[in-house]
């Protein structure tokens, strides 16, 4: 796949964040790695570990309706982990795939950008930083610092 080395994460909008966390964490068996909160303390995202390089993000939906509407319950995007985002962006551009965002540093400490498929599905491209939120959480889960 010329630079794409894995599916990085799947992000799901869910109607009940705690019920979904319980299902994926307690019933399916994914380890909860971290929670991101708003300034008021409300959780807006829960990170779960699928593998050391694959994650599930659960985010609260503003809608009681099921997918597929954007922002509703269901998948909001999927992500490809990239070794070198600049090289991959150039390769994609050469193949006629334009970035739909600037390359920037995310709140999790990773560099990222976005593309869309022909149907408008949003795809995140993510260059993992060695000291990012996900890798710090993995080290903590494994008893490291």
Image (cartoon, helix red, strand yellow):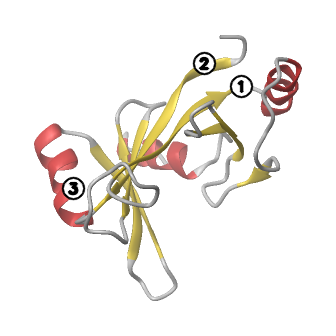
Q: Where is residue 45 in the image (x, y as percent from the top left)?
A: 42, 62
Q: In which quarter of the image is the N terminus?
A: top right
Q: Name the residue under label 1.
A: 83
How many residues crowd mark 3 within 10 Å: few (<14), some (14–19), many (20+)? some
Q: Where is residue 117 in the image (x, y as percent from the top left)?
A: 62, 31
Q: Nearer the viewer, residue 102 or 35?
A: 102
- Against 41, is 35 above or below? above
Point out the residue furthest to the bottom here: 40
Q: Nearer the viewer, residue 82 or 95?
A: 95
Q: Mark 3 points at which residue?
A: 20
Q: Where is residue 78 in the image (x, y as percent from the top left)?
A: 50, 37
Q: Say if mark 1 contacts mark 2, CB within 8 Å.
A: yes
How far separated are the C-alphas under marks 1 and 2?
A: 7 Å
Circle 3: element type: helix
Could one spot residue 127 in this view of the protein? no
- The mark that comes first in sequence, 2 or 3, is 2
Circle 2: element type: strand
Q: In this view, does 37 lie to the left or right of 16?
A: right
- The mark that comes first in sequence, 1 or 2, is 2
How many residues crowd mark 1 within 10 Å: few (<14), some (14–19), many (20+)? some
Q: Where is residue 87 in the image (x, y as percent from the top left)?
A: 85, 24
- Against 88, is 73 above or below? below
Q: Nearer the viewer, mark 1 or mark 3?
A: 3
Could one spot residue 109 in this view of the protein? yes
- In the figure, residue 80 lies in which quadrant? top right
Q: Name the residue under label 2.
A: 5
How far separated are the C-alphas under marks 1 and 3?
A: 31 Å
How far separated are the C-alphas under marks 2 and 3?
A: 28 Å
């Amino acid at each position: 796949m010329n630079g794409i080395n894995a599916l990085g994460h799947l992000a799901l909008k869910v109607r009940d964040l705690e019920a979904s966390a319980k299902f994926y964490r307690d019933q399916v068996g994914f380890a909860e790695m971290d929670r991101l909160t708003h300034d008021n303390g409300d959780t807006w995202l829960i990170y779960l570990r699928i593998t050391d390089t694959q994650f599930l993000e659960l985010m609260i939906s503003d809608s009681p309706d099921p997918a597929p509407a954007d922002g509703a319950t269901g998948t909001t995007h999927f992500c490809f982990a990239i070794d070198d985002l600049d090289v991959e962006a150039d390769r994609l551009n050469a193949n006629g795939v334009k970035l739909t965002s600037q390359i920037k540093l995310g709140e999790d400490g990773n560099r990222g950008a976005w593309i869309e498929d022909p149907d408008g599905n949003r795809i995140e491209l993510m260059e993992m930083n060695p000291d990012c939120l996900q890798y710090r959480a993995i080290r903590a889960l494994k008893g490291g610092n």
